[in-house]
Image (tube, rainbow, N blue to C red):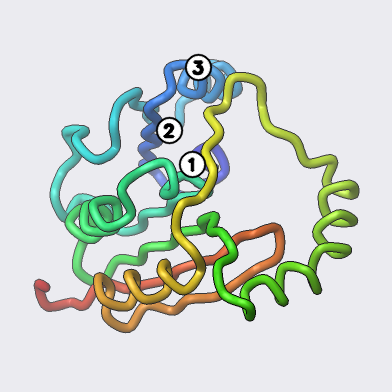
């Protein structure tokens, strides 16, 4: 993701706790100028407050404390900036299970077509929060957030930080 963003904007920072994933990202960059890759804990990394116009997290927030992660992203985002989170959640309610079971054939076909797999060395963790818990917490932490549920057990959050400090 960081490499794709770097093709469109002048400055991109990628942060990952896994030394293997940072090494992989740097290797795939082939020494070309582009993203800065930092190996460390996103929650404590020395990143500038209100230093980013756009922050995205793709299937990573479930590896962290959800509330701390969203508060940290909110702190790092400049007023008027956009936050996008694509995350994983688990089914808990009858409605969530019904959506999962209905989407199961689509998920199987999508994974097969995309030849979806996990890169070697990538840390894997099961989601602890349900879709409902994610939606409720996100609405509390990010007033006005747009929540959407997607196939492949994903959800997305899109939020624009108000121009006035919050």
Q: Who is closer to the viewer here, 165 or 103?
A: 103
Quick check: marks 2 and 1 in contact, CB under 8 Å? Answer: yes
**Cα gap from disc 2 to disc 1, whole angstroms:** 6 Å
Residue 64, x across and y down, in percent: 35, 43
**Cα gap from disc 2 to disc 3, whole angstroms:** 17 Å
Most distant residue in the left direction: 165
Secondary structure beneath label 3: helix
Among the two numbered marks 2 and 3 on one chain, the one whose residue lies closer to the N terminus: 3
Among the two numbered marks 1 and 3 on one chain, the one whose residue lies closer to the N terminus: 1
Residue 31, x across and y down, in percent: 52, 16
Residue marked by disc 3: 20
Residue 153, x across and y down, in percent: 64, 59
* Quadrant occupied by the C terminus: bottom left
Residue at 47%, 76% (x, y): give it: 147
The residue carrying pointer 1 sits among few (fewer than 14), some (14 to 19) or many (20 or more) residues within 10 Å by Cα, namely some
Q: Who is closer to the viewer here, 66 or 17?
A: 66
Q: Which disc number belongs to residue 47? A: none
Residue 123 drawn above or below residue 133? above
Residue 138, x across and y down, in percent: 34, 70
Residue 150 drawn above or below residue 122? below
Among the two numbered marks 2 and 1 on one chain, the one whose residue lies closer to the N terminus: 1
Q: Which disc number belongs to residue 35? A: 2
Residue at 89%, 49% (x, y): give it: 113
Residue marked by disc 1: 6
The residue carrying pointer 3 sits among few (fewer than 14), some (14 to 19) or many (20 or more) residues within 10 Å by Cα, namely some
The residue carrying pointer 2 sits among few (fewer than 14), some (14 to 19) or many (20 or more) residues within 10 Å by Cα, namely many
């Amino acid at each position: 993701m960081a490499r794709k963003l770097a093709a469109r904007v002048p400055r991109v920072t990628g942060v990952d706790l896994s030394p293997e994933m940072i090494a992989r990202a740097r290797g795939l960059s082939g020494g070309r100028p582009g993203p800065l890759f930092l190996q460390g804990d996103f929650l404590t990394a020395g990143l500038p407050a209100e230093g980013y116009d756009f922050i995205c997290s793709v299937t990573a927030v479930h590896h962290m404390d959800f509330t701390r992660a969203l508060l940290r992203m909110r702190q790092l985002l400049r007023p008027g900036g956009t936050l996008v989170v694509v995350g994983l959640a688990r089914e808990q309610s009858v409605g969530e299970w019904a959506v999962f079971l209905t989407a199961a054939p689509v998920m199987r076909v999508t994974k097969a077509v995309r030849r979806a797999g996990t890169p070697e060395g990538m840390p894997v963790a099961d989601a602890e929060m349900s879709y409902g818990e994610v939606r409720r917490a996100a609405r509390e932490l990010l007033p006005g957030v747009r929540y959407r549920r997607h196939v492949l057990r994903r959800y997305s959050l899109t939020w624009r930080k108000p121009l006035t400090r919050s």
